[in-house]
Image (cartoon, rainbow, N blue to C red):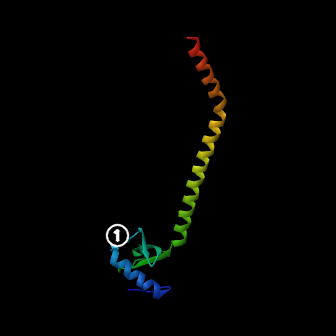
Amino acid sequence: MLLAVSHAEQQSVLMENFSQQYSLTQSINHSLQITWLNKTYEVQLFPLNDMGSKENTMTLVISDITQELEAIDIMTLKTFNTGLLGLLISEILLFAILWLPMRKILTHSESTALIC
């Protein structure tokens, strides 16, 4: 039995799609993601049996999480790029710092070979 729905036109089709993909036992107290019409939804189903009701009363929460997932993807890419840039800069600085000592070692190794 359905008691209340906000955005009924959109949500009823989404609930039908959800019910075809998952059973109630899979979705109770778990968060499931559904992609439908290029949008990602999080569906949560909570039992309300603690209210003293003898029926299997449940609350269904549907949230559009498309923007949040896109923001996570963008931030992941930015973090990866920042890490890669940091690695590149640190390698260049390490090369610049060690260039003079390496040249001295090379010069000494060549002169040592001439002495022997």
| Image quadrant in which you'd find residue 114 | top right
The x and y percentages for residue 18 are: 38, 77
Q: Residue at x 66, y 34 (%)?
A: 97
Q: Position of residue 38 (x, y in %)?
A: 46, 76
Q: Quadrant of the C terminus?
A: top right
The N terminus - image quarter:
bottom left
Q: From the image, tell me which residue sits under label 1.
A: 26
Q: Residue at x 57, y 50 (%)?
A: 84
Left or right of 55? Residue 6 is: right
For residue 109, what is the image quadrant?
top right
In the image shown, does 8 or 101 lie closer to the viewer?
A: 101
Q: Is residue 20 left or right of residue 5?
A: left
Residue pushed farthest top?
Answer: 116
**Based on the displayed image, in which of its 4 quarters is residue 46 positioned?**
bottom left
Q: Nearer the viewer, residue 47 or 49?
A: 47
- The amino acid at mark 1 is Gln
Outermost residue toward the front in this view: 114
Neighbourhood count class around disc 1 (C-alpha, 10 Å): few under 14, some 14–19, many 20 upward: few
Relative to 78, is 105 above or below? above
Looking at the image, which is closer to me, 112 or 32?
Answer: 112
